[in-house]
Image (spheres, rainbow, N blue to C red):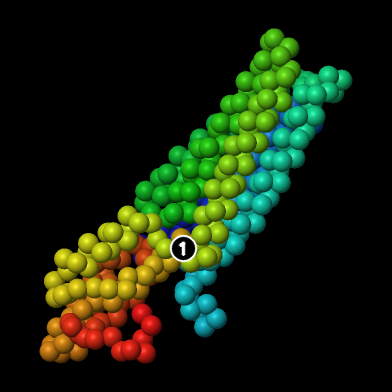
Amino acid sequence: MPHRHDTRLNLSAGLLSVAVALILVLLKLWALGQTGSLAVAATLADSAMDLMMSLGGLIAIAYAAKPADDDHQFGHTSAEDLAALGQSLFILISAGVIAVAAVLRLLDDTVTLPEREGLGIGIIVFSIAITLALVFWQRHVARKTGNKVVQADSLHYLGDLIPNMGAILALWASAKFELHQIDSVVALAAAAILAVGALRIGKSAWDALMDRQADPDMIAGIQAIAADFEGVHGYHDLKTRVAGSKVFVNLHIELDGGQTLDAAHAIGAALRRAIIAEYPRADVLIHKDPVGVQRHPDDDR
């Protein structure tokens, strides 16, 4: 079955992401002990956050494969947003710790400076190589399945290449020119990148938990589909909300009140299929009203 095949592909991407992140955490932890480099510490923190996010993504993928149940009749996708809020808080704290350590090192000339820079560079180069291999597989899976969690994880790992390359620069400058301050400067830059990413993740999760509407382009697309759909004489009260990777859509359409219930149902069902075909993440509920019906005074909306 195609659905099961997609689920297996998504799970393979999630499991590989967790495995790569775990390997990088262990390697960079060892490299930090060998070099004492704050730039390496920054990439270690980033890899640790990758591990958390990859685990969250894997859980989200597994949850997405579960059908709604009696206790969660709209599914379980909001768990993605709750996990993202926790992850963003952890990222902000880690970025703050790295930034403070970098500033203290810049102000203290007696602090121990990076050692065995060549070893650290080798570890970072290896981490870049396996990260690129992971991104290649994630992009392949995302093209096949359209899974947004896998796509987001892929973009996140691409962003990780920046602090990794910065760490290489810092270690190289320290070994070649004894420009030890670059280590702390790169760590500060990496901390800033982490903080910006954390705020972006946190805002997205917060918006979803607060039932923020869907992207304006998606809303305009749904309106265009409804406006031109055969048998639909008008529409109103289009409402959307985002929960994790799913978008819930409520729409009232106006139909010929003289046609049979079967005919009205067929138009509504066909419109629902058309919207889902264009936006596969959508969960669509359509209410049918006769053309020209007057709203009851007791109805607020």
Crowdedness near tag 1: few (<14), some (14–19) or many (≥20) residues, C-alpha within 10 Å: some
- The outermost residue toward the right is 110
Q: Residue at x 28, y 85 (%)?
A: 295
Circle 1 residue: 212
Q: Nearer the viewer, residue 232 or 179?
A: 232
Q: Is residue 249 above or below residue 127?
A: below
Q: Residue at x 54, y 53 (%)?
A: 203
Q: Is residue 235 above or below residue 19?
A: below
Give the x, y percent position of residue 106.
Answer: 77, 24
Give the x, y percent position of residue 252.
Answer: 28, 77
Q: Quadrant of the C terminus?
A: bottom left
Q: Nearer the viewer, residue 38 or 33?
A: 38
User: Is residue 77 left or right of 178 when viewed as pictured?
Assistant: left
Give the x, y percent position of residue 206.
Answer: 55, 59
Q: Residue at x 58, y 42 (%)?
A: 196
- Total numbered circles: 1
- The outermost residue toward the top is 177
Task: Say if residue 256 shows up in the picture.
Answer: yes
Q: Residue at x 37, y 70 (%)?
A: 239
